[in-house]
Each structure stands twice: as C-alpha cells, then as structure tokens.
Amino acid sequence: MTAAVLACIVTVTAASGCDLLMPGPGDIQITEPVVNRVDYSDPEAPKEIESRDIERCDLEFSDDQGLHYWISMEKRDGWVLCNMSTSNHGREDYEAPLGTLTELQRIIDRYNLVRLNGSRFETQGIPGGLGYRLYVLYESGEEINAYDNASDGFSLEEAVALANWAAGINKPQWPVMEVTSEDLEPDGSWNPRISQLEGCENLSPQVTWAEVPGTGEYAVFMLCPNLSNAMYMRYMGATETSIESGFVSSLEGGEYRGPSNTSGMRRYVIYVYALRRPPDELPGDFRGLNPYISEIERELDTAGGMRGNIIARGILTGTFSGTED
C-alpha cells in the first residue's frame, strides 16, 4: 500500500469516526464513536502466557508518523526469517538474528500485550490491510491473537516501541555491484529472444557485472518475484565478469528456462553474487519456488561451515509481457 493510498484511507476513516493511529506528528484524538464495528472477540482467550520462546509472529501497526508496518517472522535453525514491508517501501525478506525475537518478547512483557489476546474487531468499509494485528505463536503452543482493522489496539507508546524495534532489525548489507545486460531493452523489458514461448529462442540473457576484488567465483540467478521467485536461471562457478547471450542455455545440463507467461507482465530479476569460494550447498530450487531470497543468500553465504562468503551483490530487473494468440 502506498503512502498516498494510506493517507486517503485514513482520511476516509477519520470521516467515519474510527479511532485510528493517524499520519502526521502528534497524537490526534478521534472522539466520534466507531460505526459499523462488529465485535468477534473471544472473552475466554488467556491473558497470561507462560512461554517466552517465540516460534513465529505476524504484526501490523502504524507509528506516530502514519507509517504502516507489515511484519512476519519465523524462527529457523539458529536464525530468524523476517519478511517486512512498510507503507512507503516494497516488501522484502532477509535473515535476522535470534535476538530479534527476544527483543520483541521484551516489548510484549513491558506493555503486557497479552492483554489484547482474543480481541477481534471488524469495521465495515475499512480495508483488512489497515489497523493493527498481533499474532504470536510460542514453542509451547501458546498463542497471542488479536486484530482490529480500524481502531488503535496498541497505544501510541506501544506502537512507537514496536516501530523502533522494527527499524533496528539488522539486515545483511553487502557492497552493490553494477549489473547490465544487452538483452534489457531501453524501456526496461527483456528481449523476447530470452523467452521459451513459441517463436522465441529461449536464449539465456547476456549479463555483465563489475569485477569485485577477492572474489573466487560468481553466482548468477534469474528469479520471478511474481511467481514466488520461481527460478529461471542458475549458473554457479563463473570466473569471468560476463556471460554471453545463450551461454547458460547452451551448456550440457544448463539450468535455464526462459519466461513463459503468455499474457500479463511479470518481473524477471537477475541476481549476481561475488563469493569468496564455492558454497557448501547448491542454493535454491531450480524447478520449484523460492519464496524467500534470504534462504538462497544464507546458503550462498555459507562455505566451509562458516558465514561471510558473500562479498558483494548486484541486481538487475526487467519485465516480460507475453502475447496471447
């Protein structure tokens, strides 16, 4: 949701008398009663949780500047998969440290957010992607589950504490490599010759990237984020700084398949990674879906059982629109 759309929705919400965290500085009070508000709350939901080990969580809230957050986290083996977006930024996923969930639990304890467990309010005319949501699943099986698509279930202080926590989550940061392709047209679309549709050539795209000192090899991928990062190209072990058109598709057992959407526009993204040495595992699933880039990057970043294998990363995005017969 863009900031402009969010601002528009908030304006309509205010006109309807809904008590929402509003954009702009300060704590704006809405005194009119909420209309068309249906209470589906569970009064029997527990207001005490014994466990402190979070397994996964889903959060949705707005801060005091009107910035809306959508956050999902899931504990993995020694790390946390974080998927987050805000109303002024696209969704992204990345690896976060285990301490991220510990910090969230401290906020839950400090503000007694378990008090919200079981609350569920839905207001007609207000989109589901607005308001607040709190879902926490513990390793014990205990849950905190609360939702309200209009009112501020979190106090302003609680929302700001959550926003500060979200803003402080550490993300992997690598130097940016410049990536170009002769198969990317001036309008930002991929040349049809890379497609596997009838009449096209199914040639893997030409890709060039900047040399990165200290690199042992490069890894090149093409993923489609519109299809849960379905993989269309995977080329490991590159020692040069470019691959020619059709190079990967001409290799014996080469892992390449061109775009195949017959209608509609999709994004096909080239990722190039500079690695110190070959990773311990072949990253990603060439024939399946790869919902989280962070899983591929974690595999690339691990060599000899040690982290820190990625030196730099480059990204190049293009679109492809097929034509129905």
Image (spheres, rainbow, N blue to C red):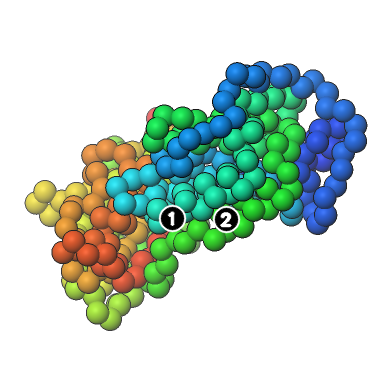
Tell me: 286 left or right of 145.
Answer: left
The residue lying furthest to the bottom in this view is 213
From this view, report whether residue 242 is shown above or below residue 78: below
Report the number of discs: 2
> According to the image, label 2 marks what residue?
165
The answer to which of 198 and 252 lies nearer the viewer is 252
Tell me the residue at 87%/43% (across/down). Answer: 29
> According to the image, label 1 marks what residue?
99
Callout 2: SS: helix
Amino acid type, callout 1: Gly
In percent of width and height, residue 226 lies at 43, 41
Quarter of the view holding residue 214: bottom left
Q: Is residue 210 visible?
A: yes
Amino acid type, callout 2: Trp
Tell me: 63 left or right of 266.
Answer: right
In percent of width and height, residue 107 lies at 58, 49
Tell me the residue at 58%/45% (across/down). Answer: 109
Callout 1: SS: helix
Q: Quadrant of the N terminus?
A: top right
Q: Quadrant of the C terminus?
A: top left
In percent of width and height, residue 169 lies at 50, 58
Tell me the residue at 16%/64% (across/down). Answer: 304
Badge 2 density bin: few <14, some 14–19, many ≥20, Cα 10 Å: some
Q: Is residue 178 visible?
A: no
Badge 1 density bin: few <14, some 14–19, many ≥20, Cα 10 Å: few
Could you tell me how far apart the alpha carbons at marks 1 and 2 are, in whole angstroms? 11 Å
From this view, report whether residue 118 is shown above or below residue 82: above
Is tag 1's residue or tag 2's residue first in the polypeptide sequence?
Answer: 1
In percent of width and height, residue 302 lies at 23, 61
Label at residue 267? none
The residue lying furthest to the right in this view is 32
